[in-house]
Amino acid sequence: MVTRTVDLRSDTVTKPTEAMRAAMATAEVDDDVLGYDPTVFRLETEMAKIMGKEAALFVPSGTMGNLISVLTHCDVRGSEVILGDNCHIFIYENGGISTIGGVHPRTVKNNSDGTMDLDLIEAAIRDPRGEIVYPTTRLICLENTHANSGGKCLSAEYTDQVGELAKKHDLKLHIDGARIFNSSVALGVPVDRLVRAADSVSVCLSKGIGAPIGSIIVGSKSFIAKARRLRKTLGGGMRQVGVIAAAALVALQENVGKLESDHKKARLLADGLNEMKGLRVDPVETNIVSITI
């Protein structure tokens, strides 16, 4: 008897499709550290366009993408970033913003839907008059979808409100958009609209859309220029990386449209599990199914 294993540990355990492998084998490449790899350039140009930002930068991982983004905005040691107490940057990225960047995290309680209350965000902003003793608040971070809240989507309207709050206090807004395409599909809102208020966004290519490696950072041209230098500092500059970028281009073209099907399958699984005694499944919005036993 033939058995088939369905691996649901994570959306990071995908395998490259035949189309991806073919694109990788025939990719046109050059030295990306020097800025000449044409396939990477195509990917960065396409992602900047999709996200509605001026420029983009390919990086090896989402963790590096978030680290570079935070350090680019908080380029003075002792800066402070406001972020959720249950967010990926704070919990799952080795404390890199502190250990490498000297950036101090100030957490605000994440609600069950992944948001943070606006009044709590504003209350966490340091009073500049106390700079003799306080860190200097420079950045707010959001996560969309919010993984630890079960893949919940942050609305464009909520993100706009946080963006307005950031502007009011002369702060920057970064979105950890590892699964931003899932949010866009679930909400029926174009991805560029979801991140319009953000100064920078990191987008993972190796999660829901199934590329084997890599993430993209998007932002202004000046932001990406600074980020490119930090990428090199952190060891993220790679040479003929068009071999990898080629698979990501296929993922963008072929797999974003399949996310709705992923979400339907996740809800189907959740509904079935909820009928089993001793299991409780949280409401499913995207592709994450959280089960309490």
Image: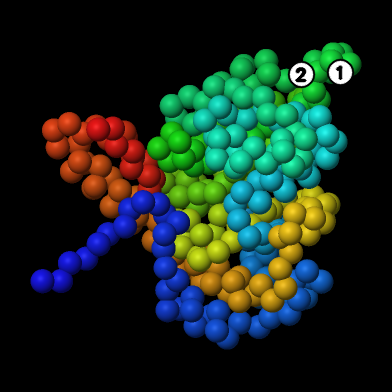
Q: Residues within 10 Å of mark 1 (few under 14, many from 20)?
A: few
Quadrant assignment, res 282: top left
Q: Is residue 8 left or right of residue 232?
A: left
Look at the image and tell me whether residue 146 can be seen.
yes
Q: Is residue 54 left or right of residue 279?
A: right
Quadrant assignment, res 242: bottom right
Locate residue 161, reporting x and y percent.
Answer: 62, 29
Locate residue 16, reporting x and y percent.
Answer: 45, 71
Q: Residue furthest left?
A: 1
* On-image quarter of the N terminus: bottom left
Q: Callout 1, which amino acid?
A: Glu
Q: Are marks 2 and 1 in contact (CB under 8 Å)?
A: yes
Who is closer to the viewer here, 27 or 193?
A: 27
Reading the image, the residue beneath label 1 is: 131
Task: Name the residue at 50% across, 52% down.
Answer: 181
Locate residue 224, reporting x and y percent.
Answer: 77, 54
Task: Name the residue at 25% across, 42% down.
Answer: 270
Task: Name the residue at 83% across, 34% down.
Answer: 77
Q: Callout 2, which amino acid?
A: Arg
Label tally: 2
Reading the image, the residue beneath label 2 is: 126
Q: Residues within 10 Å of mark 2 (few under 14, many from 20)?
A: some
Q: Earlier in the sequence, mark 2 or mark 1?
A: 2
* On-image quarter of the C terminus: top left
Up/down of 122 relative to 221, above or below: above
